[in-house]
Image: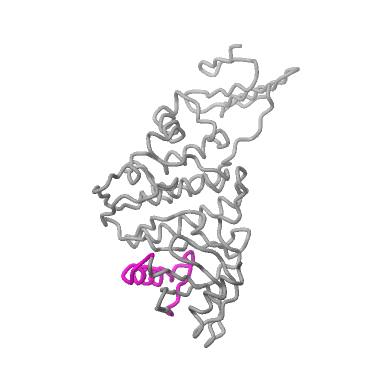
Amino acid sequence: MEAAQNFKIQQVVDDHFDVLKYLGKGTYGQVVMARERETGKTVALKLVKKDRSNQESFFRELCMSIFLSSYEGIISTYFTFIDSPSHYIMSQEVAPAGSLHSLIQWDVGIPEELVKRCAIQLSRALEYMHSKALVHRDLKPDNVLLMDKDCHHIKLSDFGLTQVAGTLVSSMSPIIPYMSPEHCDLRYGDYLALHSSVDAWAFGVLLFVIYTGSFPWKRAVDKDPYFQEFINWQNAVQRIPPPTSWHKFSREAQDMFHHLLSKDATNRSPVGVVMKYLDFQWEVEEIPEKTILVVIKEDCEMREYEDEVIIIEGEDEFIIIENHGDVECIIINYTLEE
């Protein structure tokens, strides 16, 4: 099947490239690894079908990609392009380790260390774009390319939907999990003025996906029960526990997600907020079933009982108790009552 696919593509690029490997396909075309005959350089060719796009859209993406290529965290796009009878073709540098999507194990995700490496590099790449008044609009694991399998060097790619901030955009179909609620709520004939907060939302969803190996919701709309549960929690975080899918995260990580995934776009933090949370552990440590955790900063002591361990810690004027066993505690002014 792949050989047949390569043969068809070879016919399209025959005068300029030798197709080496089929890398994948997207909504608008395919990507192959090829060798440029004139220079011998190995490149990735992105072939966009003319019946799925137009010349203006292709050249906008090409120019945008070349413009952003100077940044090390963005995939390089070369000036070479082909206008064949059936396709528009651009050439880019090869990402030898594939895409971030290929690393994700369903319902497991990837290790926290790798997630944080991705978070740092992606936040910087997006900040670079936002400093140029550009909004990516299509952030997802498929569009994050790996220069190595351990995510020491990753690159943002695919700028087919990238637009200047302030551009009016209409509703899109289908609605995908990475789409912000203000975009999901658009109806036919409505328009949204683009803002970098759209990328911040997608960035938050992407971090959830690569950490857990699952989506937090199908669509960021009120009719989606998982999304509505998250928003209810966000609005009453001090009074109700997090939804089940968020139990995995520490309080610090949950706070980070609340900043990135604020339903109100005007209150949503920029992508760089993630840098404040890198020194914290993002995953909750496993606690024995009959253990109560309470924290007192100033005077930390440990009391050992036959069946449970009570660790006392403090946090400013109040104490948070996590009850994982049969013992219930009320703490008033740092005094423990059982």
Residue 117 place in picture, x, y as percent: 56, 54
Instruction: Name the image quarter holding the C terminus.
Output: top right
Residue 118 place in picture, x, y as percent: 54, 55
Query: Given the current orientation, which residue lies at the most extreme left position?
Result: 189
Relative side of 1 to 59, left or right: right
Q: Find out whether residue 49 is within the magenta segment.
A: no
- At 61% from the left and 54% from the top, the residue drawn is 103
Q: Which of the colour schemes (rainbow, by chain, secondary structure, one colour) is used?
A: one colour
Q: Which residues are magenta?
A: 52-80
Residue 153 place in picture, x, y as percent: 56, 63
- Of residue 135 and residue 7, the one placed in the foreground of this image is 7
Q: Is residue 169 above or below residue 62?
A: above
Q: Is residue 148 above or below residue 219?
A: below
Res. 81 image quadrant: bottom left
- Of residue 244 and residue 258, the one placed in the foreground of this image is 244
- At 30% from the left and 60% from the top, the residue drawn is 164
Q: Is residue 61 above or below residue 251?
A: below
- At 33% from the left and 72% from the top, the residue drawn is 55
Q: Find out whether residue 64 is within the magenta segment.
A: yes
Query: Given the current orientation, which residue lies at the most extreme top position?
Result: 338
